[in-house]
Image (spheres, rainbow, N blue to C red):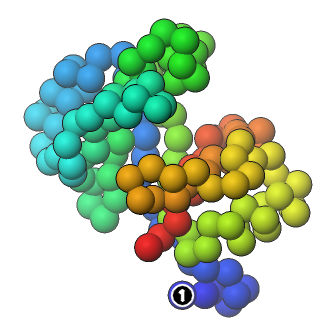
Amino acid sequence: MPDESGKSLIKLNHLALIVDDMDAALRFWGESLGLSAAGERRTVAAESVEIAFLSLGDARLELIKPTSDDSGVAKYLAKKGPGMHHVCLEVRDLEARLAELAEAGCELINDKPRERDGRRYAFVHPASTGGVLLELYERG
């Protein structure tokens, strides 16, 4: 659904936290705060991470733990420590949105969408977003 500018409306999909201890993170966010699982806890070998999603109203909270010491996520954790990793927004036409961002001078980590589990996504570099890693999902 377009807004007044003709662009597709954006919706929050998830907030991602990088953790160094998945069990402790699940105890706090899941058990202590009462957030329920929104899918299985699993390893994504292609990205060298273990992930778990928790329900957070209409959005989700993603917990990410590196499974390899030399992955990008592990390097991020070593440099910045546990905490906020990225914000994920849903857009209707991912390729069009990436083209608009590139034309506006934004630095894209992925200039072409990637795909995992049937979902297309891409990342925008924090240098273009005021310091926040931004993931864009294509809304199905």
Q: Please tell me which residue lies in front, 118 or 4.
A: 118
Viewer-proximal residue among 29 and 115: 115
Which type of secondary structure does the marked residue at label 1 adopt? loop
Identified at 62% across, 55% down, the residue is 113
Which residue lies at the image location 48% right of the left edge and 31% below the top edge?
Answer: 47
Residue 101 spot, x, y in % from top left: 78, 61
Q: Does residue 129 appear anywhere in the picture?
A: no
The residue lying at 51 percent from left, 53 percent from top is 115
Numbered-mark total:
1
Query: Looking at the rendering, which quadrant does residue 71 occupy?
Result: top right
> For residue 119, which quarter of the picture?
bottom left
Q: Which residue is mark 1?
A: 1
Where residue 93 appears, as percent x and y from the top left, is 61, 73
- The answer, for residue 24, to whether it is visible in the render is yes
Can you tell which quarter of the image residue 17 is in?
Answer: top left
Query: Which residue is nearer to you in this view: 132 or 39?
Result: 39
Q: Mark 1, residues whose alpha carbon is within 10 Å: few (<14), some, or many (≥20)?
A: few
Please tell me which residue is depicted at 24% across the width and 46% down the height of the picture.
54
Q: Please state if 7 lies on the left or on the right of 103 as rendered.
A: left
Q: Is residue 127 above or below residue 45?
A: below
Q: Is 98 placed left or right of 31 in the picture?
A: right
The N terminus, quarter of image: bottom right
Disc 1 marks a residue whose amino acid type is Met
x then y, percent, for residue 87: 52, 48
Query: Which quadrant is the C terminus positioned in?
Result: bottom left
Q: Image height check: is 140 above or below 20?
A: below
Q: Residue 78 location, x and y as percent?
A: 54, 11
Identify whether 77 is placed above or below 94.
above
